[in-house]
Image (cartoon, rainbow, N blue to C red):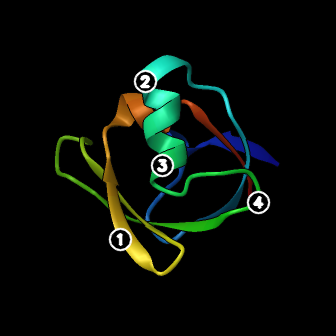
Amino acid sequence: MEKTLDKLKPGEKGTVKRVTAEGMIRRRLFDMGVTPGAALMMRKAAPFGDPLEITLRGYELSLRRIEAAGVLLEV
């Protein structure tokens, strides 16, 4: 099943299938290790939904919801 990263619920896991974001956001995601094949887990979301905290490659990463929407996952 495919989902974008911003649609994951806390505790859900997935594997990055494709990064659909463009421009500087795409570059930033790649620089932080959000690349196809990377496994990640949604840790938590802030009370109003922004930012999101994910665990990726052994570290915690905070992303804005708009950035997370550009990451397609296989759940």
Mark toward the start of the polypeptide (2 vs 4): 2
The image shows residue 46, relative to residue 70, as above or below, that is below
Q: Which mark is residue 31?
A: 3
Residue 5 visible, this angle: yes
Residue at the disc numbered 4: 37
- Count of numbered circles in the view: 4
Q: Quadrant of the C terminus?
A: bottom right
User: For the residues marked 1 and 3, what is the alpha-carbon distance in whole angstroms?
Assistant: 14 Å
Amino acid residing under circle 1: Glu
User: For the residues marked 2 and 3, what is the alpha-carbon distance in whole angstroms?
Assistant: 10 Å
Q: Quadrant of residue 62?
A: bottom left
| Within-10-Å neighbours for mark 3: few <14, some 14–19, many 20+ | few
In the image, residue 34 lies at what x, y percent?
Answer: 56, 52
Residue at the disc numbered 1: 60
Amino acid residing under circle 2: Met
Q: SS of the residue at dot 2?
A: helix
Q: Which mark is residue 17?
A: none
Q: Which mark is residue 24?
A: 2
| Within-10-Å neighbours for mark 4: few <14, some 14–19, many 20+ | few
Return the residue nearer the eye: 45 or 53.
53
Q: Quadrant of residue 44?
A: bottom left
User: For the residues marked 2 and 4, what is the alpha-carbon distance in whole angstroms?
Assistant: 21 Å
